[in-house]
Amino acid sequence: MAYKTVYEGWKSDPEAFWMQAAEAIDWVRKPGRALNADRAPIYEWFTDAQVNTCWNAVDRHVEAGRGDQLAIIHDSPITHSTKGITYAELQKRVASLAGALRAKGIQKGDRVIIYMPMIPQALEAMLACGRLGAIHSVVFGGFAAQELSVRIDDCTPKAIIAASCGLEPGRVVHYKPLLDKAIELADHKPDFCVIYQREEEVARLIEGRDVAWHTFQYGIEPAECVPVSGDHPAYILYTSGTTGQPKGVVRATAGHLVALNWTMKAIYNIDAGDVFWAASDVGWVVGHSYICYAPLIAGATTIVFEGKPVGTPDAGTFWRVIQNHKVKSFFTAPTALRAIKREDPEGALIDDYNLRSLQALYLAGERADPDTIRWAQRNLRVPVIDHWWQTETGWAIAANPLGIEELPVKVGSPSVAMPGYDVQVLDEGGHPVPAGTLGAIAVKLPLPPGTLPTLWNAEDRFRKAYLTQFPGYYETGDAGYVDEDGYLYIMARTDGVINVAGHRLSTGAMEEVLSNHPDVAECAVIGVADDLKGQTPLGFLCLNKGAVKPHDQIIKECVQLIRDQIGPVAAFKLACVVDRLPKTRSGKILRATMAKIADGVDFKAPATIDDPAILDEIAASLRQIGYPLQKTA
Ligand code: COA
Ligand code: AMP
């Protein structure tokens, strides 16, 4: 009953709960109180404290005698190399980089964009920003120049730190030309760019703007940690919403430290000195919280993995990493396991490795399907823990808190609400529904420390997107239900967000790009079920009357347009031409109905539909491209 006691303890006195958790952090000035509700429903945490993120993630561990312990292990099957960095080395490297950034004018509050692949320098750049109180914004390498430029204009960075290239299997991702193009497209121009030259590709630097990572640190005085107030933004991370304009999720410094540190023990059962591995990317929230910050704040060893679950070189790569580095808790996306399962259905490669160090596998980022969970349970013989969270929350809303109590696993459920989250399922009118009834999932305000206090430069959008629909609650954008035991089931998004290979993408953003094609008059993008990636985007294109090109040609151009403007990560490869789109009488496109037709599941045409006959046309067009897919046994 330990979980219940902890959860009820939080509920009866949230202030005391978080003040207690705050004891584990090194403060420059201790917080006098936890919650600041002065601007409710905008809530902030530990606003009267002074603290530094980098100190808590790096320096304090060196002071405590962990200098010789590995802080980061870089394991790169793509470059066939493995390298460790101790806490003492990390401290030196980060202090030097921060010193060089400071010498070029970076100060507390300045924004710095980081555009880097899975190399330790990405974490060093994040920590160096934290050291100075600069606000970083990491942009995922699979985005195109256009997406990077949108982020440059939104957060107006003084500097951009990038690598010369990223490495995808069989392909070098030329970061530097993408960066140059993004700066050209953006209205805002950074003062300077720092380029980390990788051996695999040395980029041409632009004189007067670009400096090389090593040379600009030469002879520099290392920087000390700069204290910031508890509510100072540690970072901005852009995520997809309903429209093409990404949302800049703000993470405040003190709440981030307190909450992440709490999760390492309570959820992942990790102590200082343990090895923790999240196989994600620093460009996503999982990478921020569980590749970079949380393991380091807790004094653990984190793994930066530059590879894929399959093909680098085979479906045994994950098990090799776990064995070689003695990983205790491992976190990945269900898609990655599905990819492995497809290549190694019996899990034969698992037997080649000694996985005795592994205590549990954690899954998040998308719905974990029961088949995949059972496959992992059967083959790994450790608890398989699905947990549910979002970029906005920065840590799990629901989980099975192994470090508190291992609760019975219910396959298909990410288990129960974590302390800090009062999760409710609401009907359209905002009233809680009984157990077992589907509804919108919302969290009673205030959200706990570590979650977003607002969106960067967009407080109105923050209020409208999250706080308005259900006053007094944060609207998660997910729909689902709670069972009688309080276990949550996350079933679908309520907005235009789809989840492709654990990556969160906006169908609205794709529609904006497609409508720029000269022959496209109107379009809709939906997510259809995909055995490997969970969902995959599918576009419906209505063409202008005068369009003369063959449809195949137009579709090819549209696929290329999304790749060029959003990036390869959108994985947009499917589209069909239709005469008309099904709409309600008020003109709303019926995307959910189209998705049901494409997936071959039962549906009822909404009563508000303008012309039901269009649904037959949609079904016919889908059949031509092979949808609904034939289910394999
Ligand atoms: N930089 C540049 N391009 C990238 C990239 C990056 N960091 N990450 C992905 N891409 C590209 C890929 O090369 C691919 O390009 P292609 O169309 O030229 O082949 C495209 O984006 C789509 O990538 P992805 O969705 O990863 O598909 P894939 O077919 O290459 O791989 C999986 C399939 C299942 C192996 C892969 O999706 C995977 O590892 N998924 C797990 C993802 C994950 O951990 N998510 C967690 C987020 S919390
Ligand atoms: P992101 O912000 O990229 O982390 O994506 C968050 C979204 O991914 C959530 O709102 C859910 O729709 C989905 N998601 C994340 N984890 C889970 C999970 N464990 N089960 C179901 N959906 C999930």
Image (tube, rainbow, N blue to C red):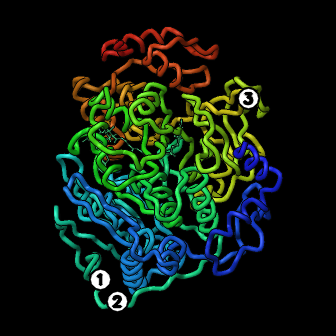
Q: CA distance from mark 2 to mark 1?
A: 8 Å
Label located before the other in sequence (3 or 2): 2
Residue 171 horizontal/vertical position (percent): 18, 49
Decide: marks 2, 1 in contact (CB < 8 A)?
yes
- Looking at the picture, does residue 61 appear above or below residue 78? below
In the displayed image of the protein, which residue is found farthest to the right?
12
Residue 574 horizontal/vertical position (percent): 32, 27
Quarter of the rendering containing residue 122: bottom left
Q: CA distance from mark 1 to mark 3?
A: 57 Å
Taking the image as shown, residue 584 lies to the left or right of residue 207, namely right
Element type at marker 1?
A: helix
Amino acid found under the numbered disc labelled 2: Ile
Task: Tell me the quadrant of the picture where the C terminus can be found.
Answer: top left
Q: Residues within 10 Å of mark 3 (few under 14, many from 20)?
A: some
> 94 or 140, which is in the foreground?
94
- Looking at the picture, does residue 328 appear above or below residue 600? below
Residue 64 horizontal/vertical position (percent): 52, 78
Depth check, mark 3 against mark 2: the one in front is: 2
Element type at marker 3?
A: loop
Taking the image as shown, residue 186 lies to the left or right of residue 170, namely right
